[in-house]
Image (cartoon, rainbow, N blue to C red):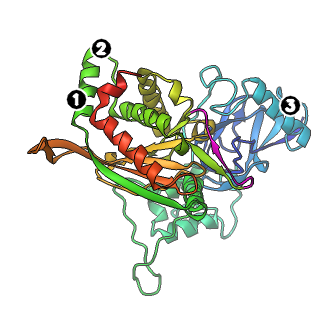
Amino acid sequence: MSDQVFLLPDLGEGLTEADIAEWKVRVGDAVTVDQVVVEVETAKAAVEVPIPFEGTVICLHGDEGATLKVGTPLITVSGAVSTTVTADASTPRAYEQYRAEERAGSGNVLIGYGTSEETRPRRRRARRGASGDEAAPSVPASPGMLSTPSAPRVISPVVRALAREHNLDLSALLGTGPGGIISRADVERARTAPGTEHVETDDRRGEPRELRIPIKGLRKAVADKLSTSRREIPDATTWVDVDATALVAARRAIDAALPDGEKITLMALLARLTIAALAQYPDLNSTVDDEQNEIVRFGHVHLGIAAQTPRGLVVPVIEHADSCSTAELARQLRETTVLARDGKLPPVRLTGGTFTLNNYGVFGVDGSTPIINHPEAAILGVGRIIDRPWVVDGELTIRKIAQISLSFDHRVCDGGTAGGFLRLFGDYIENPITVLGRL
């Protein structure tokens, strides 16, 4: 028996790195095959990582919050007997064997890949904040490492620096490491605890100073994609106000006719009308192949739905949305929204869109110039629906009005096509029954 090093596995979808969100084990713990040992956060989703070994944890290769590259050491297990691979996980042959078993559905998989989450046994542990050297099973006392018995027990200078940076009193913190050692996770919890405010000050003059927030994980992925969109796509935006009174009434009528427990959301109806308009203006359901200097028009609609989550903005994709009924669209939207908010969307569900619908009205705003979700050719936005004065048949009345906007790639089409699509979509909103009756 020998030590086994488990490398951060390939998370798929071209992801090359991940942030350690939460360790599920600590040094000294016994682990079994398929036990989840860490939750990592990628640019696209939160992913639980199971280990293909059994044995005793002797090293965690990174603190919570650290960024690791795919293929670099994640965790080392001593006295391991692997029932999944026959060689050290740090060797290419063993690593490829592990990935092959993932694809075959062996059970030793990441959430969202191969064997489903429901069929894989999961053993969760209560969160314990120690990791790496901070969580060693025993720590010899030496000058400069541990303070006096009445002082806080801190080993890592990184932990001390972090506490000092955020003006935290270490003596007031409860250490969760062995022997009450205060870990970096303990400091992070105290720093972000509800009701706790920390003023960043200059150590010399006591003046406020700037707070630097790393751009990483999902935020970095969003920033990179939006920057690429602005850099590579010559976009333009057009918008129009529409009367959504009939759409709101149609939704109520549909819901009233459905069995108890079934609902058609307004977003589902907007998605259905979007697909109908794209059928008349397929130029917008496309992308530009820069290498071949060609416009690629898709024969299907993989509809992206921009969604705000606790982790930030994500765009889950409903594949072949043009083949779905309105009820099926509503069901998929409900399921997708829940998974997105819980951070459980697998990366594969966040790629491959051909057109994006963005309901920014949920933020209480009327209009926006949305940035195209590269490499798509257009994004449709819908503002809030509110009561406004409106002229109907020459008479002033109160109607439910919304502003809709379209940002489009000017290489794919001109303003005539974009305006035609947006006006048609607006007409569908104002007269939804005539459209929905044909779908």
Q: Quadrant of the N terminus?
A: top right
Image height of 343 relative to 432, above or below: below
Kind of residue at badge 1: Ala
Indicate whether residue 111 is drawn in magenta: no
Query: Could you give the CA–CA distance between mark 2 and mark 1, rounded to whole angstroms?
Result: 19 Å
Q: Residue at x 37, y 63 (%)?
A: 197
Q: Which mark is residue 249?
A: 1
Query: Which stretch is magenta?
Result: 291-300
Q: Which mark is residue 260?
A: 2
Q: Secondary structure at mark 2?
A: loop
In the rendered structure, which disc, 2 or 1, sits on the residue that comes first in sequence? 1
192 or 161, which lies in front?
192
Which x, y percent locates residue 314? 51, 46
Kind of residue at badge 3: Val
Q: Residues within 10 Å of mark 3 (few under 14, many from 20)?
A: some
355 or 431, which lies in front?
431
Task: Please report contact status of discs 1 and 3: CB closer than 8 Å, yes or no.
Answer: no
Which x, y percent locates residue 417? 47, 49
Q: Is residue 153 visible?
A: no
Q: Secondary structure at mark 3?
A: loop
Query: Could you give the CA–CA distance between mark 3 and mark 2, rounded to whole angstroms?
Result: 51 Å
Residue that badge 3 annotates: 85
Kind of residue at badge 2: Asp
